[in-house]
Structure formats: C-alpha cells, structure tokens
Image (cartoon, rainbow, N blue to C red):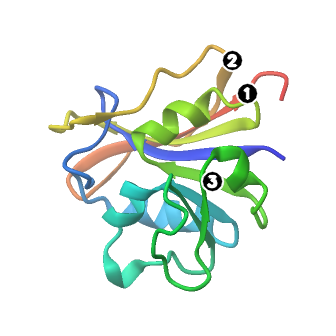
Amino acid sequence: MGFSIVVAIDENGGIGKNNTLPWHIPADLKHFARTTMGGTVIMGRKTWESIPQNYKPLKNRLNIVLTGNLNYEVPEGVKLASSIDGALGLVEGKAFVIGGAKLFEEAIIHAECDELIITKLFGSFDCDTFFPYIPDSFEKVSESPLEQDGGVKFKFVRYVKKNA
C-alpha cells in the first residue's frame, strides 16, 4: 500500500520555523483538508504538538502520531506508532505523511512512498526546518496555475514515483 507526502515548501525548501508554519495561506489549508479528508494522516510528535488544540485531532481522518514513547498521551481515537512501517499497518484508507522534517526524510526514500503533493510557495520565509531533496525517482506530473492567497503566490504541484 503506497502513501503520499503532503507539504508546503518555500523557494529555499523551507517548511517551518519554531515548530509552526511561517505563512498563513487559507487556500493551501483548504487544499490540505480536501486532499487528506477521509484518509489517514501520519505525523511526527512535534507536528502533532504544533497543531492548534481546537483542530486536534484533524477531523474526518485517522490521526497517527509517530513517537519513540508509545505511552505518549493522545486523545481517544488517535493512534501511536514508533515507525513508518508500524504506522502503515494501522492505516485506514489513503495514507498521507504530513510532517515534520525528520519524518519527511525517512518517508521520501521509503519504498511505499509513491506521491508528493507539494504546495510550491514563491517567496522565501525565515525557516529553520527544511524539506529533503526530491529524489530523481519522482517526476512532476501536474502543476496548477499560479495562485495567490494570504499575500503569497503559489502553485500546487504533484509528483509521482516513476514506474510506481
């Protein structure tokens, strides 16, 4: 069973600062919700902690948090796993890895990662966390027209693993 990575990346590969998103793009948040709705979102503990309390767990999706501490406190219905493979064994529906940086580094080279759904931001933000290099095994298959929201220009870009 394959999985997708969903992420917004600035021109320098930045994805976050101080465990938050350094931009606010309502259209991207709506795109993220539409894309992941009804599936499973897999995230690291820090990403889980960065989600505002009133949005946790992400609604209408199975939430899986990766952590080395399987006694970590999460609300009822949220599952814990200690590895990507462990999380994939719990998935219901389509699986989406949503961060953070350490998890993206493991996920993008995982044999089951077959799609990258990237919001490409035009601009540089003062990020301290970055997305890994996209391997040559992925090819761009679609790109939306240039959009703008929240004062930021962006495109939605989709990559798939070659021969996947």
Whole-angstrom CA distance, mark 3 to mark 1, is 15 Å
Label 1 packing within 10 angstroms: few (<14), some (14-19), many (20+): some
Q: Residue at x 57, y 86 (%)?
A: 76
Q: Amino acid at mark 1?
A: Lys
Label 3 packing within 10 angstroms: few (<14), some (14-19), many (20+): many
Q: Secondary structure at mark 1?
A: strand
* Residue 163 at x, y percent in the picture: 85, 23
Whole-angstrom CA distance, mark 1 to mark 2, is 6 Å
Q: Secondary structure at mark 2?
A: loop
Please identify the quarter of the rendering in which residue 25 is found. bottom left
| N-terminal-most mark, 1 or 2 | 2
Identify the residue under disc 1: 161
User: Which is more foreground, mark 3 or mark 1?
Assistant: 3
Rendered-image quadrant of the C terminus: top right
* Residue 11 at x, y percent in the picture: 30, 28
| Disc 1 and disc 2 in contact, CB within 8 angstroms | yes
Q: Residue at x 23, y 59 (%)?
A: 150
* Residue 107 at x, y percent in the picture: 60, 36
